């Protein structure tokens, strides 16, 4: 079990370090985050988290290929892996057209771009790194998952139901990492839970990559319109009491996930941490912070 905590982006450095220490003390195994060009740098942020903690793994989920030269990404990953052995996972991704187009760059041929980016990273490796860093791709659909299988250690998926995890495992095969994210909301009232969930889904349902992926699993144009139908919202966001959320997490593991990242939906970082504290005793086999 790990945590995907985009809510940390934009928080002061000490708030981030304090949150990382608390998540580690609760017993979670990792903290992942995303990256938006011009808003944050995953390598800098995760170095700060690694400095503040002693055990927990940090993961780039994802390092955006539009944010830096592939040789720079490789050098940064090697440096983190050398400084903090076995505590950093590099996730690399192509992001989304509507997001990248706003930066003034042109988003095109994402699969080709990713292949070229991996080639550039590999060319930059003049010697085997002293401590290899696991490299995974942000992957949703078949061709990117196949590239993850053939060129990396596995895949990190986001905004997906357990059915996608099962499909991804079939494509990746048995010996590649599969790390899905699962959004969660600790709320038992359906109306309140779905209102919170729709604050999350409304952004992602404006991105074609996510919409097209969901349609592969039987969701219709009506399901993906606006902030999503009840059926779609319930598939993407696990809401309810801790036992109900644990059932959804278990569904990802049963479908073939190696490591599930829960993303608590809350108004602020304090609310997210309270949710993680409440769930730790149910989700984690050992929770040091509760001894």
Image (spheres, rainbow, N blue to C red):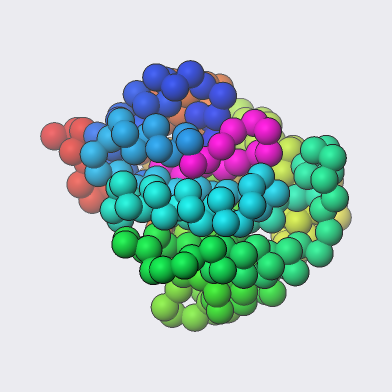
Q: Quadrant of residue 189?
A: top right
In-front residue for pair 82/175: 82
From this viewpoint, is residue 29 visible? no
Going 37% across and 26% down the picture, which residue do you hit? Answer: 17
Give residue 77's position: percent from left, percent from top. Answer: 45, 52
In-front residue for pair 192/103: 103
Give the position of the C terminus as an image quadrant.
top left
Going 31% across and 34% down the picture, which residue do you hit? Answer: 51
Q: Is residue 15 left or right of residue 145?
A: left
Taking the view exactly as shown, the residue that stands out farthest to the left is: 291
Q: Image height check: is 202 above or below 266? A: below
From this viewpoint, is residue 96 visible? yes
Magenta range is 31-43
Q: Image height check: is 276 above or below 162? A: above
Going 37% across and 63% down the picture, which residue do you hit? Answer: 129
Q: Is residue 36 rendered magenta in the image?
A: yes
Q: Image height check: is 117 above or below 4? A: below
């Amino acid at each position: 079990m790990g945590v995907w905590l985009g809510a940390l982006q934009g928080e002061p450095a000490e708030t981030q370090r304090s949150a990382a220490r608390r998540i580690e003390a609760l017993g979670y195994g990792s903290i992942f985050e995303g990256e938006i060009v011009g808003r944050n740098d995953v390598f800098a942020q995760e170095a700060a988290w690694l400095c503040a903690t002693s055990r927990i793994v940090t993961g780039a989920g994802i390092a955006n290929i539009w944010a830096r030269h592939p040789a720079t990404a490789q050098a940064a990953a090697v440096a983190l892996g050398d400084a903090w052995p076995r505590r950093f996972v590099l996730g690399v991704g192509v992001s989304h057209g509507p997001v990248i187009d706003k930066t003034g760059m042109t988003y095109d041929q994402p699969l080709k771009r990713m292949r070229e980016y991996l080639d550039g990273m590999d060319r930059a490796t003049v010697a085997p790194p002293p401590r290899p860093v696991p490299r995974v791709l942000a992957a949703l659909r078949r061709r990117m998952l196949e590239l993850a299988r053939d060129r990396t250690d596995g895949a990190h998926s986001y905004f997906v139901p357990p059915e996608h995890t099962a499909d991804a495992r079939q494509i990746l095969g048995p010996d590649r990492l599969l790390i899905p994210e699962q959004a969660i909301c600790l709320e038992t009232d359906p109306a309140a839970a779905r209102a919170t969930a729709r604050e999350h889904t409304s952004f992602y349902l404006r991105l074609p990559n996510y919409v097209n992926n969901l349609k592969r699993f039987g969701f219709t144009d009506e399901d993906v319109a606006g902030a999503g139908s009840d059926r779609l919202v319930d598939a993407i966001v696990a809401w309810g009491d801790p036992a109900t959320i644990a059932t959804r997490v278990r569904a990802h593991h049963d479908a073939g996930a190696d490591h599930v990242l829960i993303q608590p939906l809350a108004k602020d970082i304090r609310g997210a941490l309270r949710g993680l504290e409440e769930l730790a005793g149910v989700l984690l086999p050992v929770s040091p912070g509760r001894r």
